[in-house]
Image: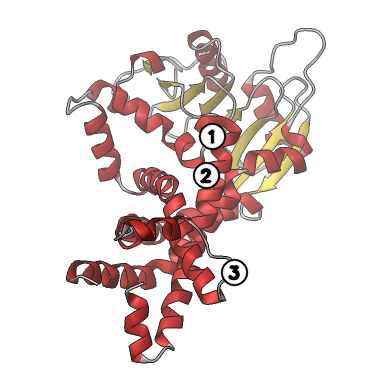
Amino acid sequence: MTTFRKAVGTLHLWLGLSTGLVVFIVSLTGAIFTFQDEIRDATQAWRKVEVPAQPTELLLPSRLQAVVEHNHPGLKPAFFMLMGPDRSAVLYTTDKQGTYFATALNPYTGQELGHLDLRKDFFSIIQALHMYLLLPEEIGGTVVGISVLVFVVMLITGIILWWPKRKTDRKRSFTIKWGARWRRVNYDLHNVLGFYAASIALILALTGLMMSFEWVMKSVYFVSNAGQEYPAEKTPPTVDTLQTVAAAPQPVADVLYQQIRRGSPAAKMIFLGLPTSPKQPVYSIAYERALYYYHRDEYYFHPVSGQLLKSIPHSSKSNGQKMADVNYDLHTGQVLGLGGKILAFLGSLISASLPVTGFMVWWGRRKKPKKQRSKAATV
């Protein structure tokens, strides 16, 4: 083994041992979360509603909000998710401790269909594990981000170590020798599966890093725009607190909703922000497809009057902003539909297996006599 490969192998080993547990947790929870919408639809009947036979307008947000305030007094409205014509509308609220709740309602009748404490929701817990290991968000997010960054280095060094030195080694490098002893099978599982999943795992890791580190997001934005800046699409408007404005003639949430419907009539899903401060604009998003987050029109409104302060339609966005918008759909694989989700699931599952099989390779070599260990290192 050359000095270079020895150095790469040492780097690969110690980086893997130092971050293996975090990579295992993040990858496994990522695999579980991939099909969260499909599993929720199959197990939570309240996510779907029957569309009336006669054309019927959806109830205005204030009507739905009134139902939640009546049924769950003391909760403060945070935002709405209007999921589509055949799906429930969901109002997210918080209590005095900052705990989030989700209340699903029939958007045609206002009937409450379900109420969740998100601290106890399975997929909310999985998501929190995936993003920050159930630690305080700033600490856990940093640990996860650094570990995923190390995982990218691991993928690159792993490919270097896997790369066959001789033509005669190529067939062995692409296949798992199932009939061999378990240590050999484990070695092949680590190397061969790692190679096949490397490209998918790299996409999942890089899109995850875009969520963890602003500098990664800015780098992707810069490269996608060939170095050109578009400050107008990245700078939110400000609310002039010195200017006196008239209150909205009807509930602000209704005013915002109606403007979004006029601006994005084809939108199937809407994130409707609610005023939290008279000094901060209200941010809302209209999505072209339900449960897909790429094609989005963005809106900023005055928190008191409901006046539109700024809109950023999808068609006007730069390539860099579109890359930022598609990031979540890339990360979960759903940008390619069901096939993409299956690839993301398998890539995440294999990524979770790599720290386990890698640890077993290292542990097995530790138990070998020194001569056997040095011989094994050349394989």
Q: Amino acid at mark 1?
A: Gln
The answer to whether marks 1 and 3 mark residues whose Cβ atoms lie closer than 8 Å is: no
The span from disc 1 to disc 3 (Cα, nearest Å) is 37 Å
> Residue most toward the bottom?
369
Q: Compared with residue 171, is residue 372 higher up or lower down, i.e. above or below?
A: below
Q: Is residue 243 above or below residue 105?
A: above
- Whether residue 279 is visible here, answered yes or no, is no
Q: In this image, 196 relative to 215: left or right?
A: right
Q: Residues within 10 Å of mark 2 (few under 14, many from 20)?
A: many
Name the residue tied to disc 3.
Answer: 179
- Which dot, 2 or 3, sits closer to the camera? 3
The disc label shown at residue 334, or none: 1
Residue that appears at 42% across and 31% down: 326
**Residue density around tag 1, few if under 14, some if 14–19, many if 20 or more, within 10 Å:** many
Residue 375 visible in the picture: yes
Q: Secondary structure at mark 2?
A: helix
Residue 356 coordinates in the image, percent (x, y): 50, 69
Residue at horizontal 25%, vertical 66%?
8
Is residue 336 or residue 179 the one in the foreground?
Answer: 179
Residue 261, image x, y percentages:
54, 12
Q: In terms of depth relative to the viewer, which is nearer, 344 or 301?
A: 344
Identify the element where label 1 is drawn. helix
Give the label, 1 or 3, closer to the camera: 3
